[in-house]
Image (cartoon, grey):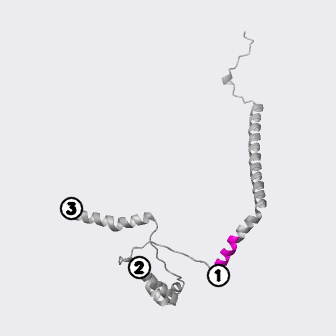
């Protein structure tokens, strides 16, 4: 019995079989390459389908492009760039009739080209006043703005009056 070699337990075995490790690496590498190939194949098929779609509908796409491009470029070239600004205002004088009259007055000053008067009214220089095109007034369409204005004008005032009288 003394001549027998000591048995090693599997827990004491800390060696790694390199053949198995290389086989695992090769399998992972093959799957990564396969995934990359399938991804590029999918992208290429999508590109081919897009080109076939464009080939099939080329005349319709070109017509739609021209129908949008020609009037848009004509408008841009004749009128130039146009900038719009909007705001919600509550007139100090509580009269929408007066507000509409003021806006008409401002538009008439623009039509007459009276940039000196406009620059004095709006506290801007004459060059900027000469660039004004028009003013517009519209009733509020947004329900959130209407409720917010109602709350500021009526609800808070009535509540304040009630609290002043009762307490």
Q: Which residues are magenta?
A: 67-78
Relative vertical location of residue 43 with respect to residue 15 in this rendering, above or below: below
Based on the picture, tell me whether residue 162 belongs to the magenta stretch: no
Q: Main secondary structure of the magenta part?
A: helix
Q: What residue is rendered at 38% in x and 67% in y?
A: 149
Point 71% across, 68% down: residue: 65
**Residue 21 position by quadrant:** top right
Locate the N terminus and report the quarter of the image it occupies.
top right
Whether residue 93 sits left or right of residue 8 in the image: it is left
Tell me, yes or no, whether the two marked residues, 1 and 3, touch with CB atoms within 8 Å.
no
User: Percent x, y for residue 46?
Assistant: 74, 53
Q: Callout 3: helix, strand or loop?
A: helix
Task: Say which element carries label 2.
Answer: helix
Left or right: residue 10 compared with residue 128: right
Q: Is residue 108 placed above or below 30 in the rendered structure?
A: below
Name the residue tied to disc 2: 99
Q: Disc 2 vs disc 3: which is toward the camera?
A: 2
Quick one: 40 or 68, which is closer to the camera?
68
**SS at mark 1?**
helix
Query: Which residue occupies 46% across, 74% down?
Result: 138
Disc sitting over residue 166 in the figure? 3
Is residue 118 something one can see in this rendering?
yes
Instruction: Locate residue 28 relative to residue 134 in the image: left or right.
Output: right
Mark 1 to mark 3 CA distance (whole Å): 65 Å
**Residue 124 in view:** no
Residue 160: horizontal and vertical position, in percent? 27, 65
Numbered badge on residue 78: 1
């Amino acid at each position: 019995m003394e001549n027998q070699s000591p048995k090693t337990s599997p827990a004491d075995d800390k060696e790694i079989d390199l053949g198995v490790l290389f086989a695992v690496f090769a399998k992972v590498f093959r799957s990564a390459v396969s995934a990359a190939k399938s991804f590029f194949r999918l992208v290429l098929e999508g590109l081919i389908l897009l080109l076939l779609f464009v080939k099939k509908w080329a005349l319709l796409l070109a017509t739609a492009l021209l129908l949008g491009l020609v009037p848009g470029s004509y408008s841009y070239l004749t009128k130039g760039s146009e900038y719009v600004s909007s705001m919600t205002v509550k007139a100090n004088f509580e009269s929408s009739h007066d507000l509409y009259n003021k806006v008409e007055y401002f538009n008439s000053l623009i039509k007459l080209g009276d940039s000196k008067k406009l620059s004095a009214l709006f506290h801007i220089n004459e060059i900027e006043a000469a660039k004004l095109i028009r003013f517009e007034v519209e009733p509020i369409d947004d329900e959130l703005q209407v409720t917010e204005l109602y709350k500021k004008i009526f609800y808070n005032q009535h509540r304040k009056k009630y609290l002043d009288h009762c307490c």
